[in-house]
Amino acid sequence: MQDSKILLVYYTRTGSTGKVAAWLSDELDCEMEKIIDPRGRLGLIQYLYCGFCAATRRKMDICDTRNDPSDFDLVVLGTPVWAGNMACHIRTYIDSHKGKFDKVAFFCTFESSGDERTFSEMAQLIGKDPVATLAIKTAEVKSGAFIDKADYFAAKLTNS
Ligand SMILES: Cc1cc2nc3c(=O)[nH]c(=O)nc-3n(C[C@H](O)[C@H](O)[C@H](O)COP(=O)(O)O)c2cc1C
């Protein structure tokens, strides 16, 4: 997939998914779009609310995004794992752009579990299997140990 147009879209609440997104977009030299929540979701009450909403598959409002995914050959979607699922903002994004995705790839950051189910629900919601997936633990983001895995993922995207 060399010379293809790639869009990387991600949501991050506390920065881990954002750190991986920034590394990937540099490596892939692609357009990057951060999903913004107009309300902000930090603090304990919001943590609990986010977990509840993710577990019950609710959507959360997001600010307008700049890019149309149908202008790209591949859309790479990044999310933190919330209650064993995608963040509600990624659900909103996918839902509001349904039918506009050509190829997709997914990445997530998480503490310990829920990555597989997150990817499987994202594929189900989009109606397409990803060309590649990347699951990175928060500890690997913090230590920088994610780079080998991320490098392999990026190579898969550019060579597929
Ligand atoms: C509401 C909520 C629910 C979470 N649920 C899970 C979970 O089910 N499994 C897990 O391994 N980590 C879970 N986490 C941890 C995050 O996935 C992890 O810290 C992630 O790296 C955060 O990404 P961010 O810094 O980009 O927001 C949860 C975090 C939040 C805020």
Image (cartoon, rainbow, N blue to C red):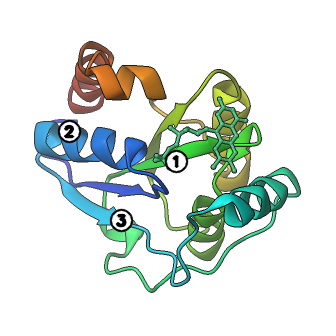
For marks 2 and 1, the one nearer the N-term is: 2
Tag 3–tag 1 contact (CB < 8 Å): no
**Cβ atoms under marks 2 and 3 closer than 8 Å:** no
Would you say 119 lies left or right of 145 here?
Answer: right
Q: Residue at x 47, y 84 (%)?
A: 63
Q: Label 1 crowding class (10 Å Cα cut-off): few <14, some 14-19, many 20+?
A: many
Characterize the local packing of mark 3: few (<14), some (14-19) or many (20 or more) Cα atoms within 10 angstroms: some
Q: Which residue is mark 2?
A: 23
Closer to us: 33 or 15: 15
Provide the secondary structure element on which disc 1 rests.
Answer: strand
N-term-proximal mark, 3 vs 1 = 3
- State yes or no: Cβ of the residue under disc 1 lies below 8 Å from any atom of ligand 1: yes
Mark 2 and mark 3 lie on one chain; the one further toward the N terminus is 2
Residue 79: image tag: 1
Measured along the vertical axis of the image, is residue 70 above or below residue 55?
below
Give left or right: position of 47 versus 63.
right
Spatial separation of the CA atoms under disc 2 and disc 3: 13 Å
At 21% from the left and 31% from the top, the residue drawn is: 158
The amino acid type found where label 1 is placed reads: Thr
Disc 2 secondary structure class: helix
**Which mark, by number, is residue 69?**
none
Could you tell me if residue 62 is visible in this image? yes
